[in-house]
Amino acid sequence: MISNYIFTIRQFNHNIHMYLIATALLGFTVDGGIYSVLFNLYLLRLGHDPELIGMINSAALLTFAIFSLPAGMIGSRWGSRQVMIIGLTMMLVGCSLLPLAEFGPASWQVGWLIGSYVVAFLGLALYFVNAAPFAMSVAPPEERSHVFSVQVALWSLAGFAGSLVGGLLPSFFSSILDVSLNEPAPYRYPLLIAAILTIPGILAILTTTSPEENVAPPSKLELAAGVNLAQVGKAAIGLIILMAFIRMLQVTSMGATSTFFNVYLDTSLQVPTLQIGLLSAMGRLLAAAAAMATPLLTARKGHGAVVIWASVGGALFMLPLALLPHWSAAGLGFVGMVALSSVRYSAFLVYSMELISPKLRAAMSGAGEMAAGLSFSFMALSGGYLISLFGFTSLFLMGAALSILGTLLFWLYDRRPRRQLAYQTSES
């Protein structure tokens, strides 16, 4: 099975290779990696409290959510490849402007931070909503599970490297600038480096061809879904809404930690920046290994079962993070949750995409990313206030409970024989 896995990866075409490179660069820089370690610490060094940090993150994440559905529509009209390039360019602009906020008038600083981060996350929405339809279009059905698992693995490995670099760079710049780590300058320059590193991602996507020029043939399930959805359009809309709602609930654990894990370690446990980077890196490294195992797990257990067990396990790993105020417990909870989230994400992505006809994939992707953005935005905004009123424990427990609820809804859907009915409809 492992030799077949390696053989399949070697068969990836040029479009897939370039797509994976661009996505890995995002994992190293903005969507994980350097930003996951340093952005909130930079805001703390600028003098902002957890409530304002939550508001800034929430504004960007809400933008991601609101524009996810339009991003899918734009991709359907202009082509996913073109919109991905526009999205990466907007991320370059937003992330380049963000670390310059401290040089403007003090009264502009918060607005500058929110505005530039919003531009970056609008670009992120344009990229990621169209990334899944792009990959599904250029990858044959037998390679898709491997493509998405390798994507998550590379993303996680890049996040591992970016977290290590993010943990090391402030000390490096503190030394050469001769300033304290309590100042914003050692954090500003790594964020600028992260912005510059989006340029190779733009160049990678520019070398690809449009999916319409290289469309992979549909799978049996997609053909069956196309017949079903042509007959019952309302059922397709209901399915998209249901999958989006399930995803919104399942990602709350990740939403709670992505915004506040480093804030918790820095403010409550007084963990050094380098150690925060190492813990973040460990989570990304194990996530990469877990993602690479996903096709083997789904081949044996099925995508639905893998989604369920990975989601439950990720929620349970939130408990030591919430209940044991020590850096080792926090690190264990974070690492386990991130690793299992990578399994859930790649399995859920293939599961949901293959439920729907190819023409509606952009809508499914847009709805899913919108749901994830709303979830992350809600956890960021509510988290700032929850932390101020009740502490970090309340936020982490809420994230775990909502993830379990989403998993229960997914289990109730998955146990129904919808896929068998789709095949029967196709064959009748």
Image (spheres, rainbow, N blue to C red):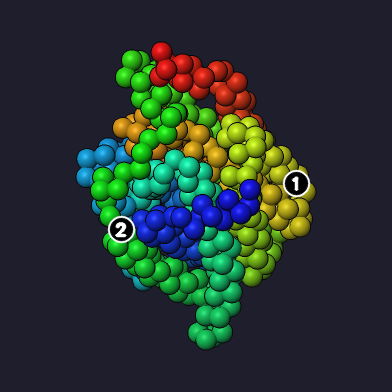
Amino acid type for the residue under numbered disc 2: Thr
Amino acid type for the residue under numbered disc 1: Pro
Residue 373 location, quadrant = top left
Can you tell which mark lies on residue 208? 2
Q: Residue at x 26, y 39 (%)?
A: 76
Q: Residue at x 43, y 72 (%)?
A: 193
Q: Which residue is drawn at 36% across and 25% down?
A: 226
Q: Residue at x 41, y 24 (%)?
A: 224
What kind of element bears circle 2? Answer: loop
Front position in the image: 150 or 14: 14
Front position in the image: 120 or 209: 209
Furthest-left residue in view?
78
Q: In this view, does 230 lie above or below 192?
A: above
Q: Is residue 245 above or below residue 299?
A: above
Residue 109 location, quadrant = bottom left
Front position in the image: 327 or 403: 403
What kind of element bears circle 1? Answer: helix
Residue 300 place in picture, x, y as percent: 65, 37
Residue 38 place in picture, x, y as percent: 53, 64
Residue 177 visible from this viewpoint: yes
Earlier in the chain: of badge 1 and badge 2, it is 2
Can you tell which mark lies on residue 110? none
How far apart marks 1 and 2 lie (CA) works out to: 44 Å
Residue highlighted by disc 1: 320
